[in-house]
Amino acid sequence: MGSMSLVVAASRRLFRHCRSLTTTIRSRGAAVDSALPAFRSICGEDGVSLGAAVREQHGKDESVHRCRPPDVVVFPRCVEEVSALAKVCHSKRLPIIPFGTGTGLEGGVGALKGGVCFSLRNMDQILDLHQEDFDVTVEPGVTRKTLNANLRDTGLWFPVDPGADASLCGMAASSASGTNAVRYGTMRENVMNLEVVLADGTTIHTAGKGRRPKKTSAGYNLTNLFVGSEGTLGIITKTTLRLYGIPDSMVSAVCSFPTVQAAVDSTVQILQAGVAIARIEFLDDVMIDACNKFSSLSYPVTPTLFLEFHGSEQSLEEQVTTTEEITQANEGSDFEWARDAEKRNRLWKARHDAWYAAQALRPGCKAYSTDVCVPISRLPQIIVETKADLLENKLTGPIAGHVGDGNFHCLMVLDPDDPEELHQVHLFSERLARRALAMNGTCTGEHGVGLGKRGLLYEEMGPETMRVMQNIKNALDPKNLMNPGKVFLAEEH
């Protein structure tokens, strides 16, 4: 076939695609228009928005992924309204995108196929607190900071801390984690039951309505099926969570090391010694240097561990003694200690301000956090290889990580309006993820798959496992309405 014929054929394919896309958009627009009266009757005139600014706000998160706004945003006030709205969407074949606080990092709330954003901020009740049983049930508008503020006088707290003040139901949907995971686990270990509205409006309770036992052997583990499902299987409208007693005492420390290997060796040995450490965070030399400049600190510009211990005075003394002996055996510096809250906060300032310190390296640019997790023994190798990759490709990416569970991040600083730089960061993120996969790790330890890691998920899981996941998706959402285009590369319906 001649070159002119190839051009003509390509033009025809493009024309057919554009005509099909135009038809789809017009059809969806008509469906939205016909659904609006029903939406307004369910959640009131104020509970439905077509405003461009509101739609734009609900079509993006904190990621660098180019997303798009939904056609309409609805604001249900209770599970009954969520169910009724879902039934309308199901009958009109309108996509449904759940929205919590928009703090995700993988483009999980973009309306790739248009449709209806369910903003759940008005469902903000703490419903059932059982202090004696150490559990609580909350609606999706409740954030982790709000919950802990309400728990303050009970002696209890919820320790999963992803950094952002995220919605607790959103944290369940993304299987969030954070700095305390080494001791208290991730959302997977701390969600006991979920109320979920499915694509057709059916409401289910994954562990049975009102059930909240500490353990169960009854039936399939549907709770953990929905934890981490990223809105692709249903809308989480309630979550029942494990709570913990606020520790009698907390002690924090900072310790510098000559090499990444020495810092990670200390971490492994601390865990092997059975020290119930609450937090153990790693910052590389580039990150420490950025934090020193940003927060006017004077930490040595070397690989550094930030540690925190929770417990009674007696248990803390044992934990601290053991940890200090281990770090000094690995050429760690003398610990800088802090006991009272004010000094602890000052000590942790470098870690807490890492995001802003990274951004300050290039004023006016945006930070994007990568996310992989490997077996702890492979951390030194992957961090060293990653730092070499950054230098070779002239990219800015200081490293911070939850070293106690092998999870770390490069805080990439880039100009999101520079297509070439954005492309280079995407390529780097893929290389980093594949490096983790080659070390028997995962492409995401806590941020989720969303848009950015769909292909990597296939590489990680393999075709047979992905086929099972797709079959589950098809069974629960046969019309592919729940957050379409996320997690799965292609969905056949």
Image: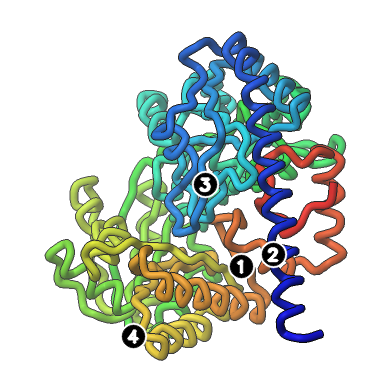
Could you tell me if the residues under marks 1 and 2 are in contact, i.e. CB atoms within 8 Å? yes
In space, the residues marked 4 and 2 are separated at their CA atoms by: 39 Å
In space, the residues marked 1 and 4 are separated at their CA atoms by: 32 Å
Query: Which badge, 4 or 2, is on the more N-terminal residue?
Result: 4
Farthest-out residue, front? 4
Helix, strand or loop for disc 3: loop
Foreground: 23 or 164? Answer: 23
**Residue identifier under label 4:** 331
**Residue identifier under label 3:** 68
Q: From the top left corner, tell me how far across and down residue 226 is, in percent.
A: 70, 41
Q: Amino acid at mark 2?
A: Leu
Q: Number of labelled discs?
A: 4
Return the mark for residue 443.
1
To which quarter of the image does residue 412 belong?
bottom left
In space, the residues marked 1 and 2 are separated at their CA atoms by: 7 Å
Q: Residue at x 64, y 44 (%)?
A: 113
**Residue neighbourhood size for the residue with mark 1, other residues' Cα within 10 Å, grouped as few (<14), some (14–19), many (≥20):** many
**Residue 176 visible in the displayed image:** yes
In space, the residues marked 2 and 3 are separated at their CA atoms by: 23 Å
Helix, strand or loop for disc 4: loop
